Amino acid sequence: MGLTDFLNPVKGFGVSFHQMFTKSETVQYPEVKKPTAPRFHGRHQLNRWPDGLEKCIGCELCAWACPADAIFVEGADNTEDERYSPGERYGRTYQINYLRCILCGLCIEACPTRALTMTNEYELADDSRESLIYTKDMLLAPLREGMEAPPHEMRLGDTEEDYYRLGLQPEDAAPTVPAEGGGRASADNAVKREKAAKGGEGK
Ligand code: SF4
Ligand code: SF4
């Protein structure tokens, strides 16, 4: 045994004494709630387009990416009479099982439409298994000003591409339709696009 090994127990006491004189980090939770880091992985959210339509297209990529098998998605077809998202498909059933979820964030990386993001909410404890399986209505982002609950028609463009361009920078979002008279898209849509760009997803 060398001399440094001999001093190890003394060094251990040094750490203890140091802690005794440092400022306490105790937070009186739940009365006091410290804000999380901005990119903290908390409860998920299913985002909407600025007109209220859902961004989820029911593709199940999030469920396939999940290492804990915590997501269940069932897609269905939109119809002109009953439309929940801009494209062909929407997520009819969406569940996240928070008894399984490890909040790793792989699902939000896999989502092609930024439909799924994570909030900073961390108060997910409960005393019943059923209440920890979050359903689509619990996960959907609240309706903000100017949004209407689906089903309803597409109001921000005539195609799903029009909706996806809303997330691009203005120089990338040059209209691909003739300014007048050529096709269904119109100057009206440009106004809608500009208005929509001011909206945005939950996080
Ligand atoms: S955060 Fe991770 S564990 Fe939780 S649902 Fe997403 S991929 Fe699965
Ligand atoms: S949340 Fe994203 S990845 Fe999951 S089904 Fe919906 S669109 Fe696909």
Image (spheres, helix red, strand yellow):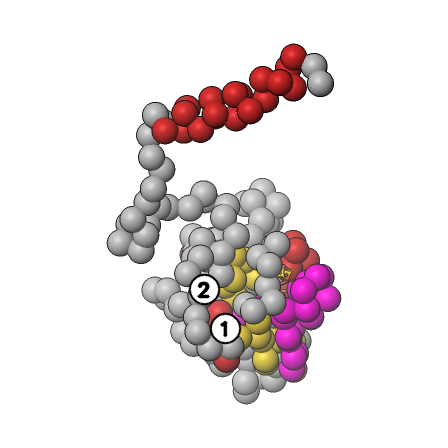
Residue type at mark 1 is Leu
Q: How many neighbours does mark 2 have within 10 angstroms: few (below 14), some (14-19), or many (20 or more)? A: few
Q: Which residue is mark 1?
A: 132
Say if the magenta span includes residue 100: no
Left or right of residue 24, residue 52 in this image: right
Q: Position of residue 195 (x, y in %)?
A: 43, 56
Left or right of residue 37, residue 28 in this image: left
Q: Position of residue 77 (x, y in %)?
A: 65, 82
| Mark 2 vs ligand 1: CB below 8 Å | no
Label 1: which secondary element? helix
- In primary-sequence order, the first of circles 1 and 2 is 2
Label 2: which secondary element? loop
| Mark 1 vs ligand 1: CB below 8 Å | no
Can residue 159 be seen? Answer: no
Q: Position of residue 100 (x, y in %)?
A: 60, 67
The numbered dot on residue 62 is none
Q: Position of residue 125 (x, y in %)?
A: 44, 66
